[in-house]
């Protein structure tokens, strides 16, 4: 089951870390640490093997994959010895990466994206392609009437004005080319009625949004802990300090707003009420890929006694995200092959702001994921 | 269903906080924050109501309940206004508290404990009594051949040498008086083959050990988080700084060893391997009841990238323990009434080191507990 | 040496905590913890004694002092037993508090403020009065040409448009009434050329700005530590979570900007360069007076090795500020008596953003303060 | 002024990091970050230049310097590019390293150490040699009557029983060879009356003990902060988690005791009283050279209000220690040349447990050091 992974933002940190990792796993140079599809409960013959994954993608920058991999090695994100050992394989990926197309209308751009995907399929005799958005977070888009139905959208895309943000246009193009789509960012992606309609009619699955890699992952186990113990959370405030490309982009208040909202959502879901407090994001270039998040939780116990908990998370975002990108590609390709179309709400385990109405507590999300995976057959 | 709660250590912080709380709940002066049996998923008509609980107990100290409650109010553990409002009810409890008996043989002591329990039952027309050990932690006891069978134990107890540590003698006496037993401490309690035999023959249930109130509670959700994400925990080290009676006692290395062992156990269970590191306990009188625990977790992600997490927990141990003591009393009384005898492994949610072979991840323990509670009928 | 302390914001948390404390010190009910003028190196017969301090002040709210003191006791800021013991003395202070005057012109308002001060002096036969601003932080004011000289200011104050922010008007009124002035907030206070001119001509001293009570205090010792060890600070980022009146006000971005700027200033001064990062302030009502600040410092050591330090500060702002308000009143009154006029740059120890060009490292500020105090004679 | 640095433990992490750094500084490949003798206030023509330092030393292991440097690069302690660029220079140092001698008597061993030092001086035409102990911490030694006077010691050293721990024997040998001695560890070093006598008669200076690199450095600025603000520290507790050779050794309770004692000393000195609490050291192999220390300080403010501060220090011990070793060598060589003999109490800035009776607050230690350095002339 040869499977294509087409990355939007293919020369960025997450994408290249995923490429280094998948290539190293195929060469059996590393353990699959961080890949949940390699846990005994999720291992499945229905999933494509490491040797069956082929990378392609779009990006607006042109840095060669190997050069980016070297930069990641220098920053401590991936081991230098792996990059050196896999230099040829990483260089070979460049031949499947394309500049992000642009045409006079969004319909035209979408068609050119779809053409890139179809050529990728033919070139590598791929059974499935999963398009995954790992580019930087977009500002919250303006609502547009054309988002409401596929018919309206199709017409609007042919006009001179852009109606879709780039992430949604990528989802549109993926669906028209018969490819699954995953949004690993808080951007719009496939979350528009018109796109849901298209995915259904094209018979392709999709998932998202916003990979749960750090602070929110911790929240998704701590918030249920307070709930299960009937302890009342009074406030939950946090700050994320991060550099790297994503950090710079999130310094933009518009993008920041999207991200911050998705970071606090888990609290309301898990607790049944919204505690006071916000989660901030600050760009600190010096910190680079190794994000630091700090959260303070104040809570009330028996007879109103006030207590506190703090945590600090020093995580490498790209190293946390990349294995999940590979997991999502394997699971979504297998779901597509098994005939699933539309939103994969069973993948909520991976996301800060999952599609559908699944549970928000990590343990329940895990049980849902395990049942989903067990139901997939090759 | 009038239910007696007989506390070993009845004049200590946990016991008196439980008394203040139960009395306040009966008077509808407070919300049942921290009581898990008041969560919608666990609420059950099979459990005794707040108005049906009657307190009694043993202690070696003689501080009046009200005086201890005032001290707890001064320390910020319980609200002073509650203590003032409930002064009469709290004072009334003194008449059901007894000095811990002592006789020339342990058989004699046990008989006098059992007599106190039987008189308590008659005095208040109690349907069930649950004996709960909330006294300070004992050193790890010497093994003794008489622990292996009820016959051997019965004989040995009549001799002049003590063969059981106090917590186990309390369990023995409880069982002989037809009472359920819970050990909320890491002491031996009912965890001896001879006592298991006795509980079975007496038809009474028991549970334990060591209430999960702070650092270990957090571990029981964070360790599964790392496991579910296939992140490898390299080291997990922690320190607990606490004052109060329990802190002073745990400064004794022998008691400390028992507690520390039970604190790290959850890691091996949840992760499937033992990470490096230990959990220390230090006595700092100044800190009083408001314990501070700090943990550092170092872990490995994709391609071996090293990352870190820290947390600090500022919790009031008595305020965290007391509602669980009430929950356990309600659940165990209902189980007893429903005909359960022997170890209640379904109560692992409450303990650091639960009896039996149940799950160690908090979410799974919760599911087990919910199913158990749903199965109880009045 | 009877000395008046006239507080702007006299019914707020800092002011009333200072009143409770001074009254308790006079009655010898407490130790002078937190009062630096009681350290052996600063104790001086030139300073007014606790029994010589008399409180008065302005406020726009009308809560009685005792009622506010009770609220502070309930919040754990001051001990309830002290408030109970000192109820009469605290109630008596109300008779010296006045509503903040307002007249058609700012000249008129200033005159009424000055009248209140003169009457306070006569009523209590005060040798000195120190006016101290402890009201909530103002937004950064618009520049105005009349700020540049006393002549221009005098003229402009008679017009219908306000030209001075309230803190500066208070300083103006204080100076015209021959009183010293201290701004304990980041507001404008006396920091205008026209007011410097007035203080000089009136022969009165002044000091400020912005009491250094928590995170910035810590910065003022940690930043010099890095500098003295030639370790290069790459980034210094922080967040302050606080409730209470001040927190609510600082949620206003304009006021926040003033405060945040004064919080980072110490870094540039102590290090000789501006590290990356900002210091945020978030309002969390639940947290009340017990502020939590968290800072992350990333720094570079030998051969460029990257390292990190974090700290968390759980402080009670009013309890940290109040003794410094008393210290400042004592020192400034003594300086006034000793003939000092104009800015007291030797008091930089107390402030985040001190007047003049003194040192920013705490140890050097201390040495300067000790020399200053030693030079005061009664 | 060619100056020899003779390191006891010359193939360990601190020593080799110092060698890499000094060689890189000589080659102008790096900035002197972390070297305090390069700060404007301490720069002095009296100090030997980077090009005038020559390394030699003893060790019981035989790992080549370059191999150890490569291991340090792999661990992130020094940059790999520097090690590669300086490979020849680092390899050349091996020719000046010797196995630690051992003879039938300690007198014999000392004589062989001294011979190594004299040969080192002749071989490189050195004007001064500074012997610096950077080997692992010794257990606290047994007291011995021969420690009390040089005469008794000289006699005892000729006997078959060892009377001096290795660090003290190294100091003895250094003094007899006319070399200065510095103990950068908490071991005994020169702190015996007999050795003080010998240093005086030989006219050589010495300094120590125990380089102040992390948690204690922070304590030496925070403790004075609390003191200067008249805030009462109630408890100060900490834990140090570290791997590496030093960590493994400190897991030995005897060595640990020496280190822990020196870590708390600064508190009593700076505060004037001993707060409750201890500072623990735990060995966590996984953590390697990047130590994590966590401290909790509870303190009391105005009117007894309780507050808290925590800090976490993530430092690389070798990278913090190495530049101080170079600083100490430069300063001590210059002091020796300037005719100083006996203990250099002015170097307290560098040590956890300084010789003599100097100040313990960092800022005061700095002032003392600056005056000392200014007094040195070439």
Image: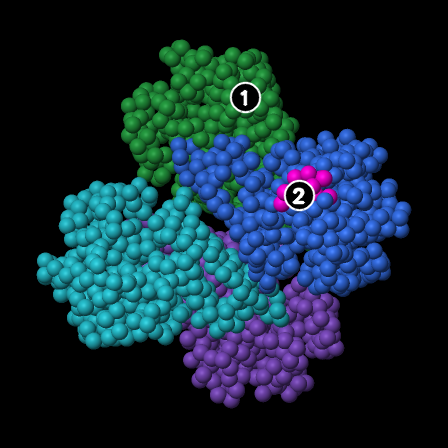
Chain colours: A cyan, B purple, C blue, D green
Magenta span: predominant SS is helix
Q: Percent x, y for residue C45?
A: 83, 36
Q: Nearer the viewer, residue B207 or A338?
A: A338
Q: Is residue C242 left or right of residue D177?
A: right
Residue beneath label 2, please? C146
Determine the residue positioned at 63% across, 52% down: C138
Q: Is residue A22 left or right of residue B99?
A: left
Q: Is residue C263 left or right of residue C153?
A: left
Q: Nearer the viewer, residue B218 or A278?
A: A278
- Vertical side of A213 occupied by C345: above or below: above
**The stretch drawn in magenta includes residue D259:** no
User: Of discs 1 and 2, which sits in the foreground?
Assistant: 2
**The stretch drawn in magenta includes residue C151:** yes
Give the class, few, some or many, for how many residues have Cα within 10 Å of label 1's Cα (few <14, many ≥20). many
Residue beneath label 1, please? D206
Please, what secondary structure does the residue beneath circle 1 have? strand
Instruction: Indicate the chain on which mark 1 is placed.
Output: D
Q: Which mark is residue D335?
A: none
Instruction: Indicate the chain on which mark 2 is placed.
Output: C
Residue stretch in magenta: C144-154
Q: Percent x, y for residue C181?
A: 74, 44
Q: Percent x, y for residue A119?
A: 12, 59
Q: CA distance from mark 1 to mark 2?
A: 65 Å
From this viewpoint, is residue D337 visible?
yes
Residues at badges 1 and 2 in contact (C-beta under 8 Å)? Answer: no
Q: Percent x, y for residue D356?
A: 62, 26
Q: Quadrant of residue D136?
A: top left
């Amino acid at each position: 089951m040869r499977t294509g992974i087409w990355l939007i933002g293919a020369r960025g940190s997450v994408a290249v870390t995923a490429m280094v990792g998948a290539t190293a796993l195929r060469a059996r140079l590393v353990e699959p640490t961080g890949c949940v599809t390699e846990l005994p409960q999720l291992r499945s013959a229905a999933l494509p093997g490491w040797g069956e994954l082929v990378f392609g993608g779009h990006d607006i920058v042109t840095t060669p994959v190997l050069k980016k991999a070297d930069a990641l090695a220098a920053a401590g994100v991936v081991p230098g010895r792996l990059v050196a050992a896999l230099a040829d394989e990483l260089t070979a990926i460049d031949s499947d990466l394309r500049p992000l197309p642009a045409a006079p209308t969004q319909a035209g751009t979408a068609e050119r994206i779809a053409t890139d995907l179809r050529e990728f399929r033919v070139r590598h005799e791929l059974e499935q392609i999963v398009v995954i958005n790992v580019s930087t977070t977009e500002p919250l888009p303006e609502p547009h009437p054309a988002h409401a139905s596929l018919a309206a959208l199709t017409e609007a895309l042919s006009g001179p004005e852009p109606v879709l943000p780039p992430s949604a246009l990528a989802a549109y193009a993926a669906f028209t080319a018969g490819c699954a789509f995953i949004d690993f960012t808080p951007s719009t992606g496939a979350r528009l009625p018109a796109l849901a309609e298209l995915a259904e009619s094209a018979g392709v699955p999709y998932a998202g949004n916003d990979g749960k890699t750090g602070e929110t992952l911790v929240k998704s186990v701590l918030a249920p802990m307070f709930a299960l113990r009937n302890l009342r959370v009074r406030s939950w405030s946090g700050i994320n300090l991060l550099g790297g490309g994503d950090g710079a982009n999130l310094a933009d208040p518009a993008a920041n707003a999207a991200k911050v909202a998705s970071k606090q959502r888990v609290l309301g879901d898990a607790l049944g009420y919204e505690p006071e407090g916000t989660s901030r994001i600050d760009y600190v270039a010096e910190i680079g890929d190794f994000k630091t998040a700090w959260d303070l939780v104040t809570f009330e116990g028996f007879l109103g006694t006030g207590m506190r908990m703090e945590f600090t998370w020093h995580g490498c975002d790209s190293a946390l995200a990349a294995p999940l990108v590979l997991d999502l590609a394997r699971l979504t390709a297998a779901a597509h092959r098994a005939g699933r179309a539309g939103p994969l709400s069973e993948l909520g385990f991976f996301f800060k702001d999952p599609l559908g109405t699944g549970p928000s507590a990590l343990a329940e999300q895990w049980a849902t994921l395990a049942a989903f995976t067990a139901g997939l057959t090759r």
